[in-house]
Amino acid sequence: MKASWGFLAFAAVGVIGLGSAFGQTFQPSPAANKPLATMTPTGTFAASQAAAEPPAPAAGMSAPAATPAPTGTSPQKLVAYSSAVVDGPYIAMTFDDGPNPETTPRLLKMLEQRGIKATFFVLGSRATASPAIIKQMIAQGHEVANHSWDHPQLPKIPVAAADKQIGDTNAAIEQITGKAPIYVRPPYGAMTPALRAHLREKFGSTFIYWSVDPLDWKDRNAQVIHDRIVSHAHPGAIVLAHDIHPTTVDAMPKVLDDLKAKGYKFVTVSELIAMNKGVPEPKVASTTPAPKKKPKPANPASASAAGANGTAATPVSAKPASAKPASAKPATPTRNSSTSMGLF
């Protein structure tokens, strides 16, 4: 009798194990996604940017699954850029949310006096309200690009509405300048892979982010803005700023002069991309907000054991650690800094 029960138990365990192995072996795998190639500040190619960000600076960044560039992808023909890999001290100054009749003409005069060309990501609603300023930008050799019609978070509105935001702004810029823009900077940096692929297919857009963010929309202090830009500048940088804020424009003379004194040369986004020499690598910097994790409670038993072994136990923090935005980390003129995804 004991032998019979033992045989039955053995058989049952075998059947359960076989079923588990069968389930693991034949479980369907999720469909593979085909990410779009994106230039990161380190000159590598990353998967498309993650889902839309909330209307506040991201607390930290985490590493996403990296994807080598598709065969034949050119460093000058990527879907998106936050910076470029260049051979010289070239830098692109970009200004968002204008034009503002009170501040933008003042900035244009500063740029003209210094022979500097910049890229302006304008709102369609403001461009149509101040067409003369847009024409002045073009006359001075600056680049005009698309920042949507009135600054919504594009992933949070219907696709048809997002189409209208980009399409109407393209049309407004083309009507004023005679040329439709190819560059788009999504408001707040908010974008999803699906929407970005859709907008690229519909409008042929290339998406421009940034690698230096002085947070001038938040801290309205000319000296703070100056210090953040100058200390974080690096070759191939795309610098984010806002020509609608008086404090930002107030900061620009010293910003431009100090960057020039450091040896930087100013180019438009188009010129910077034309010089890009990015090479595909297996791992890249992230543009995906890090998921928040709850802190694990301390284990008194583990702490006691560690102390007994002569090793100090590490205390558990009461708060989950959060990384500062990339703009808070200083960068040197010979090294690219991480992508910043703060508001703009």
Image: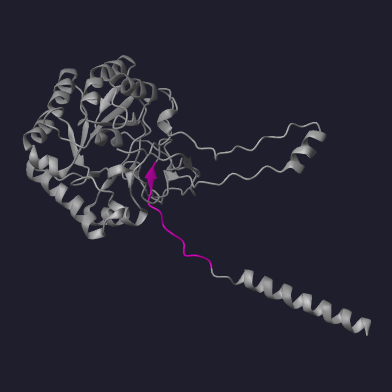
Is 130 placed left or right of 88 in the picture? left
Task: Please name whichever residue, 141 or 172, is drawn nearer the observer in this view of the structure.
Answer: 172
> Which quarter of the image is occupied by the N terminus?
bottom right
| Coloration mode | one colour
Query: Residue 339, percent across and down?
Result: 40, 37
35 inside magenta stretch:
yes
Q: Position of residue 134 (x, y in %)?
A: 11, 35
Q: Position of residue 124 (x, y in %)?
A: 15, 44
Left or right position of 235 against 115: right
Is the stretch drawn in magenta largely helix, strand or loop? loop
**Residue found at the far left of this picture:** 132
Q: Is residue 257 above or below residue 318?
A: above
Q: Residue at x 26, y 59 (%)?
A: 158
Q: State the quadrant of the C terminus.
A: top left
Residue at 30% across, 16% down: 258
Seen in the picture, residue 273 relative to 4 is either above or below; the reply is above
Q: How many marks?
A: 0
In the rendering, at what x and y percent does residue 85 appear? 38, 33
Query: Residue 98 is drawn in which quadrant?
Result: top left
Asked if the magenta segment contains residue 177, the reply would be no
Name the quadrant containing residue 256. top left
Q: Which residues are magenta?
A: 29-39
